[in-house]
Structures are given as structure tokens and as C-alpha cells.
Image (spheres, rainbow, N blue to C red):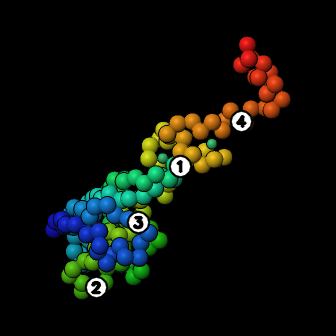
Amino acid sequence: MEVRGEIACDDALWHDVAVALATPVAVQAVAEGSAVRGVVVRGTLTGRIRAACRRCLEPLELEVSDEFDLLFDPKTSESDEDVSLYALAPGVDELDLSTPFRERFLLTVPAYPVCGEACRGLCARCGANLNEGDCGCRAEERDPRWRPLQGLRSET
Ligand SMILES: [Zn+2]
Ligand SMILES: [Zn+2]
């Protein structure tokens, strides 16, 4: 059985979640197995989120993509600590995948998104965004004992 669809940005699934979706989350999956043997659901979840760079605090959009392999096991009564294992209640002929999909997607969202590996962040002194240029703080951090010498040099 093939599962294909989208979870909308305003779906009830995301209501109490601290992640801001920029696009719906696309789902593509294949389910195999039976209620007796257990069901394996394999596929991908892809969407984009809005976040702020953890270094410079600028807003950014980030693609979040997860390849999952979920096992719905009739021999398990409780979902395992391992997020890819779920209980499969006997007699159920339709899997509710919304909660597993939500969990998987949220786990894939990076805790420390950055706008780029080269992001220089904010100056710890004045808070200026260092990606936009030097704020000049570093010059002030020079050893004050050399100041008179610097003055001499600039005069000549
Ligand atoms: Zn940044
Ligand atoms: Zn500064």
C-alpha cells in the first residue's frame, strides 16, 4: 500500500508545536505487512521550516527531510522508547500515521539551525551582526598599554 500526501501547515497536528512550517510537509511512504505480522512503513517526509539563525538571529528557511522506517508491531503493547517502534492494536485495519509522522518530522528539525557554516554571528560586545561587516570592537580590545605607541605610529 502506498501512502502519498501532504500535511498542511495549519493541520491540527502542528498546533502545540514550536516549529513554524513554511510549506506543507510532503509524505511519501510504502506500507507492507499485515495486522498479524506487523506493518513496516518506509518513506520520506519533506518540508520547509522558518527559524532564526542561532548565531546571527537572522530569519531563515530550512529544508527538513527525514527518511523513516517505522515498525508497527502487534506484539508490542506500548510504543517503545525507540521512536521507530509503535504498538499495533489487534483488529485495526487502518494505521494512524499522523502521530509517528509528526514525531519523526520534529526529531529531524535541527536544534541549532544556522544560516550558513560561514555565519560569523553577533559581536559579543555590541551585538552587531558580523556578517554585515566588522563592528570595530576588536580594535578596542587591544592591550591598552600599546595605545601610546599606536598614536605615535599614526602621527608619522
Ligand atoms: Zn547566521
Ligand atoms: Zn562589536
Which numbered disc, 4 or 3, marks the residue that appears first in the sequence?
Answer: 3
Q: Check disc 2 and report the residue beneath it.
A: 90
Say whether mark 1 is within 8 Å of ligand 1.
yes
**Residue occupying image coordinates x 68% and y 32%:** 139
Rounded to the nearest angstrom, the CA distance separating label 1 from label 4 is 22 Å
* Pair 2/4: label in front: 4
Q: Is residue 4 left or right of residue 133?
A: left
Element under disc 3: loop
Rounded to the nearest angstrom, the CA distance separating label 1 from label 3 is 18 Å
Which numbered disc, 2 or 1, marks the residue that appears first in the sequence?
Answer: 1
**Residue occupying image coordinates x 22% and y 74%:** 34
Say whether mark 3 is within 8 Å of ligand 1.
no
Q: Quadrant of residue 141?
A: top right
* Pair 4/3: label in front: 4
Which numbered disc, 1 or 4, marks the residue that appears first in the sequence?
Answer: 1
Q: Check disc 1 and report the residue beneath it.
A: 55
- The answer to whether marks 1 and 3 mark residues whose Cβ atoms lie closer than 8 Å is no
The residue under label 4 is which amino acid type?
A: Glu
Rounded to the nearest angstrom, the CA distance separating label 4 from label 3 is 40 Å
In the picture, the disc for residue 19 is: 3
The residue under label 1 is which amino acid type?
A: Arg
